[in-house]
Image (cartoon, grey):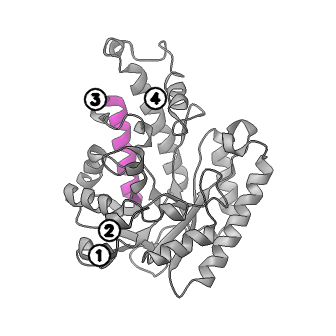
């Protein structure tokens, strides 16, 4: 579909490439109708900066985010006749301070931040998607004395504790900010795509709790194409989580999670095939047009009319066209 709710540019994200305007122009070229611009919120401690941000300061990142909002709204106006650009942010939750600062940021830029992409990238203050070594460090931050004794013999105790902590952090984020888009919900198994949450009862119960809570306030669950470029056979979320969301009546929206113009719309045909395999009959997107019950930040949920898989967009979006 010609919609994406989650993207980044090298202009405002050091692990991406290209300018924000180049991302927008590529989205227009590829036939997107609605495209979300959602850079990461600033991090507020030097310890939390990524390797590519060496030499920067938290104050620099705060100004960079303000610069992003200014540029995103400029582009929204310049290209309004060609594409609907939505301006949002992607969350971070490393310590409780991040939630306090996010609250302040949303208040400071009220009306300019149109929606929130709710993401968790850290467990116990350690990145889980930076690289495999960092993931292992986060996993092993749960010592043997922390794990449930009866699970130790199966070797699953530490992982269950890790997953539970991830979903507890996610629940805190949902409760406080009610993000419109639930991003890559199962990022916690990035390096273990065959892991099944049902084998970890404590984690599964917390995941189910989170999904129910998000459904109750109307969130969209992002189907995120980025997993397909990271050696997954599916988009995020994987089949078990997608089935849970579907069974509980959740609503799905698409994202490319592009990190530069060369990633715009990447792997959308494969994502379409995955959704068809799952039997997903409805897709949704965010709009400024009043429809249904609007979210608290003002955007409205809109269902893609008709059979989404028959949209003209798919005829232009072929595997051979991918970067």
Query: Can the viewer see residue 242?
Result: yes
Does the stretch in magenta take in 206? yes
Marks 2 and 1: in contact by CB < 8 Å?
yes
Secondary element at image label 1: helix
Bin the neighbour count of mark 2 within 10 Å (Cα to Cα): few under 14, some 14-19, many 20 and up.
Answer: some
The secondary structure type at the circle numbered 4 is helix
The quadrant of the image that shows the C terminus is: bottom left
Q: Earlier in the sequence, mark 4 or mark 3?
A: 4
Q: How many numbered discs, if any?
A: 4
Residue 234 vs residue 170, the one in the foreground: 234
Q: Name the residue beneath numbered marker 2.
A: 318
> Dot 4: within a 10 Å radius of its alpha carbon, few (fewer than 14), some, or many (20 or more) residues?
many
**Side (left or right) of 308 relative to 128:** left
The disc label shown at residue 315, or none:
1
Residue occupying image coordinates x 48% and y 60%: 263
* 83 vs 241: above or below: below
188 to the left or right of 303: right
Within the image, what quadrant is residue 25 found in? bottom right
Whether the residues at callouts 4 and 3 have beta carbons within 8 Å, the answer is no
Residue located at (30% from left, 58% from top): 270
Residue that badge 3 annotates: 199
N-terminal-most mark, 3 or 2: 3
Disc nearer the start of the sequence (2/4):
4
Task: Give the magenta-colored segment's residue range.
Answer: 199-222
Q: Are marks 2 and 4 in contact (CB under 8 Å)?
A: no
Q: Is residue 151 magenta?
A: no
Q: Residue at x 24, y 78 (%)?
A: 306
- Residue beneath label 4, please? 162
The secondary element bearing badge 3 is classed as helix
């Amino acid at each position: 579909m010609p919609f994406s709710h989650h993207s980044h540019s090298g202009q405002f994200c050091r692990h991406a490439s290209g300018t924000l305007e180049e991302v927008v122009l590529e989205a227009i070229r590829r036939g997107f109708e609605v495209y979300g611009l959602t850079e990461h919120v600033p991090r507020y401690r030097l310890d939390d900066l990524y390797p590519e941000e060496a030499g920067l300061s938290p104050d620099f990142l705060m100004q960079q985010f303000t610069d992003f909002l200014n540029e995103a709204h400029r582009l929204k106006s310049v290209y309004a006749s060609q594409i609907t650009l939505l301006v949002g942010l992607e969350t971070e939750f490393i310590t409780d301070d991040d939630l306090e600062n996010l609250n302040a940021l949303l208040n400071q830029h009220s009306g300019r931040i149109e929606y929130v992409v709710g993401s968790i990238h850290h467990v116990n203050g350690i990145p889980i998607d930076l690289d495999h070594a960092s993931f292992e460090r986060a996993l092993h931050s749960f010592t043997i004395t922390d794990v449930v004794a009866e699970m130790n013999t199966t070797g699953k105790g530490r992982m269950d504790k890790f997953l539970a902590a991830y979903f507890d952090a996610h629940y805190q984020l949902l409760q406080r900010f009610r993000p419109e888009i639930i991003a890559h919900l199962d990022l916690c198994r990035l390096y273990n795509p065959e892991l099944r949450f049902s084998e970890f009862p404590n984690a599964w119960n917390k995941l189910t709790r989170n999904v129910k809570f998000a459904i109750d306030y109307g969130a969209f669950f992002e189907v995120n194409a980025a997993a397909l470029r990271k050696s997954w056979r599916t988009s995020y979320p994987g089949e078990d989580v997608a089935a849970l969301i579907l069974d509980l009546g959740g609503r799905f929206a698409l994202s490319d999670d592009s990190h530069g113009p060369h990633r715009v719309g990447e792997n959308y045909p494969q994502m379409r095939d995955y959704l068809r395999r799952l039997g997903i009959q409805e897709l949704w997107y965010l709009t400024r047009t009043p429809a249904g019950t609007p979210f608290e930040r003002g955007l409205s949920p809109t269902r893609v009319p008709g059979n989404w898989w028959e949209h003209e967009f798919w005829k232009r979006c072929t595997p051979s066209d991918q970067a």
